[in-house]
């Protein structure tokens, strides 16, 4: 049986310490901040990131360099036969295409999974890959299973301020000004490739209801209906909004008593730099098979 190892990136929300415990490797995502390069979780903590965001620093995301990816793969392939590499969604970054191109030189030993996940759903995919390794699946089998499963997840995010979406050119300045004036709390959706507008709420409570109802609808219409037999993983995420996230967890758990909430995580900084602090998110993933 071949020895397989999982690699993902820090968009998954898996910290370097957790990665060590789990026996997987996490590539830190690079950020350009006022002309300097920082690496998530290595030279840039969540707190430092939000401080710089609050100071209106010029922040942009980048992807891991080809050299850093290949150096990690080369090191791992001395010990393992195969690598399952799970980057963030190909719709949100070029890092998936880059990794897939680099993997062509590795004679079928590196399997790049394009399953369009980010943040807590990407973390779930890494956990699923670990389970599949325990079942004795090969790298190519794991890639196939995870890619088949790619649309079995959703993320809904309530944005607290339109400032960062406007700054990144994701909404027009006029729409952002109107939203601020009307105190709109937009709800965004990540499903498959893109970050899209989903609904507009006037209050945080209304936004939470919209998100909970969207998850209920997904489970009913896409994931086989709500029942104790139908295993769904729920998770909560946030941007610098931990207390509210734990309160939201209680509300969500009351609505879905049969489904465990497997994580309450900060959203990855690659998403945070586009939406700013104060957001709340809920995600669901259908259990494999």
Image: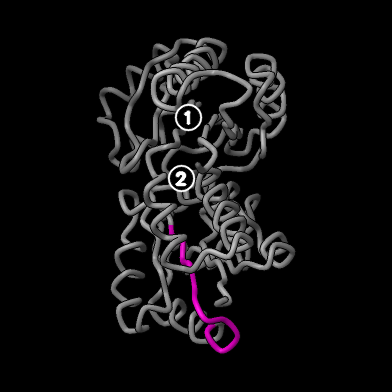
Say above or below: 282 vs 144: above
Say which of 18 and 82 sits in front: 82
The magenta-colored residue range is 77-87
Say which of 113 and 2 sits in front: 2
Element on which disc 2 rests: helix
Query: Which quadrant would the N terminus be assigned to in this image?
Result: bottom right
Q: Is residue 167 left or right of residue 160?
A: left
On the image, the x and y values in percent for residue 248 come to: 66, 22
Is the residue marked by circle 1 packed among few (<14), some (14-19), or many (20+) residues within 10 Å? Answer: many
* Residue beneath disc 2: 271
Q: Residue at x 72, y 29 (%)?
A: 243
* Residue beneath disc 1: 157
Per the rendering, the mark at residue 284 is none
Q: Residue at x 50, y 41 (%)?
A: 289
Say which of 55 and 240 sits in front: 240
On the image, the x and y values in percent for residue 76 come to: 56, 82
Q: CA distance from mark 2 to mark 1?
A: 10 Å
């Amino acid at each position: 049986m071949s020895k397989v190892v999982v690699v993902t990136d820090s968009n998954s929300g898996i910290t370097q310490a957790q990665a060590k415990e789990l026996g997987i490797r996490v590539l830190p995502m690079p950020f350009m901040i006022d002309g300097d390069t920082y690496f998530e979780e290595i030279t840039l903590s969540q707190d430092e990131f939000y401080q710089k965001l609050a100071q209106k620093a010029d922040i942009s995301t980048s992807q891991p360099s080809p050299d850093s990816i290949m150096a990690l793969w080369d090191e791992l392939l001395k010990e393992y036969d195969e690598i399952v590499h799970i980057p963030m969604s190909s719709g949100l970054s070029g890092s998936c295409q880059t990794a897939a191109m680099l993997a062509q030189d590795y004679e079928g030993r590196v399997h790049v999974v394009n399953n369009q996940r980010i943040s807590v759903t990407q973390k779930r995919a890494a956990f699923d890959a670990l389970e599949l390794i325990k079942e004795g699946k090969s790298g190519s089998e794991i890639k196939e299973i995870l890619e088949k499963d790619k649309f079995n997840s959703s993320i809904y995010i309530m944005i607290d301020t339109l400032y960062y979406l406007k700054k990144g050119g994701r909404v027009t300045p006029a729409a952002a000004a109107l939203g601020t004036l009307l105190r709109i709390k937009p709800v965004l959706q990540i499903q498959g490739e893109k970050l899209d507008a989903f609904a507009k709420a006037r209050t945080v409570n209304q936004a939470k209801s919209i998100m909970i109802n969207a998850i209920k609808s997904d489970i009913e219409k896409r994931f086989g209906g709500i029942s104790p037999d139908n295993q769904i993983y729920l998770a909560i995420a946030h941007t610098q909004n931990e207390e509210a996230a734990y309160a939201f967890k209680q509300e969500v758990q009351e609505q879905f008593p049969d489904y465990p909430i497997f994580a309450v995580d900060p959203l990855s900084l690659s998403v945070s730099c586009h939406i700013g602090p104060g957001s709340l998110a809920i995600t669901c993933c259908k259990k494999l098979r």
